[in-house]
Image (cartoon, rainbow, N blue to C red):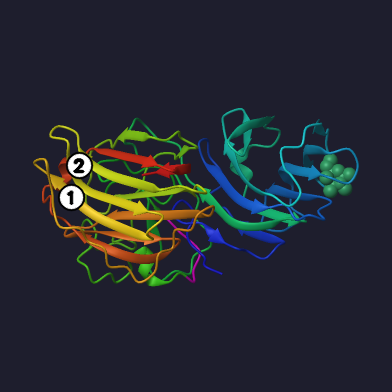
Amino acid sequence: MFVAPPGYQPVYNPTIPYLTPIGGGLREGMSIYVHGTVPENTTRFYMNLLCGESESSDVAFHFNPRFDGWDKVVFNSCQNGFWEAEEKIHHMPFHRGRVFEMVITATSHGYKVKVNGKEFHHFKHRVPMERVRALYIAGDVLIETVNVIGGGMGGGMYGGMGMGGMAGGYPGGGMQFGYPAGMGGGMGGGYPGGMAVGMGGGLPGAIMGGGDPGGMGGIGGDYPGANLPIMCGQPDFHPSVPYSIMLPQGMFHRRTVIIRGMVLFGGNRMCINFVVSRSRDIAFHLNHRVREGVLMRNSMIGGCWGQEELELSTNPFVEGQYFEISIRCGRHKFKVFVNGLHLFDYHHRFHSFNEIDMLEIEGDVQLSYVHF
Ligand code: GAL
């Protein structure tokens, strides 16, 4: 199993039942993304947000699809061993034998649940979300990906943001999860511009860039996790394609963009462009030609395309399957990881990469989220 820190990379194929700590508690704006499959013979499964790290801790949020009877989804909370009032929704958004994607977002009012891109239910808080310490998934369900995605924006657009850390153990000690220009704040602050969060261990060095030889040294570089990727804000869930968004503050060293989606069946192509909006130069163009199994990289500067880069050890994009691509800006190159593994680097041709201020995604792709 590939384990990654919350807010950055998902956990893939965890064994069920699965319990993962959400250190620091939940805060408004944090989301839990789950991609899974409901087995053909399912009866029930559930996801609990626990106020402790044991299965028997109080449950702030119980989400329980039941197929054994009239299909329904039960929401509840459980305190001191007693279940409270059930909220039953007699509509089943899941289907036996089918893949699903769901997102639970903590809001100031409660937990907003979206299944397969559609709003499903908003369960009002009964227990303060700050008490939540873990996520527990059990019952008849297969989980391909779980990702605890952190953080509301603290104090203005570029404010540092809070992020729950998982029990430590990673040699890097923590993940810098703020903005260079941001403010400290939240827990464990005190690092220049933002705050550190702990994270679970067992991570292959490559994805986190620990000891990255490619000159991805951190800002200042003298605190734990200094060379780890930077993301901020909340992801854009299920945006439509073509997708185009301005990158606030432009591209900068260590900024990381994560795109999760699915290559559509029968699709032809998918493009990701990092654009300088002022000049329409495409600093980094990534074009997946599905039929040919090619992942072409190029730049268009001053209206002219350059030399195509094509080398690839494997092509991890498969029709009808989810992918997760993470693109991290280094001083000399973009580092591209797909499904948690380093796939290729793209040396900057457009050297003033901080002028890149726009991201575009187009083609035969369905997006689950974009996070940067
Ligand atoms: C109980 C069930 C629990 C939980 C609870 C929710 O009947 O045994 O697993 O789903 O309902 O109210």
Per the picture, the main secondary structure of the magenta-coloured stretch is loop
- Reading the image, the residue beneath label 1 is 299
Q: Which amino acid does label 1 sit on?
A: Ser
State which mark lies toward you, 1 or 2.
1
Does the segment drawn in magenta span residue 328?
no
Q: How far apart are marks 1 and 2 (CA)?
A: 12 Å
Local SS, label 1 = strand
User: Looking at the figure, which quarter contains the N terminus?
Assistant: bottom right
Q: In this view, does 30 lie above or below 317?
A: above
Contact between labelled residues 2 and 1, with CB atoms less than 8 Å apart: no
- Classify residue 207 as left or right of residue 92: left
Magenta residues span: 197-202
Magenta segment includes 201: yes
Ligand 1 placement by image quarter = top right
- Residue 356 is marked as 2
At 14% from the left and 32% from the top, the residue drawn is 278
Q: Can residue 191 be seen in this view?
A: no
Residue 60 drawn at (x, y percent): 70, 42
- The residue lying at 33 percent from left, 34 percent from top is 244
What percent of the width, then of the height, locates residue 145? 57, 56
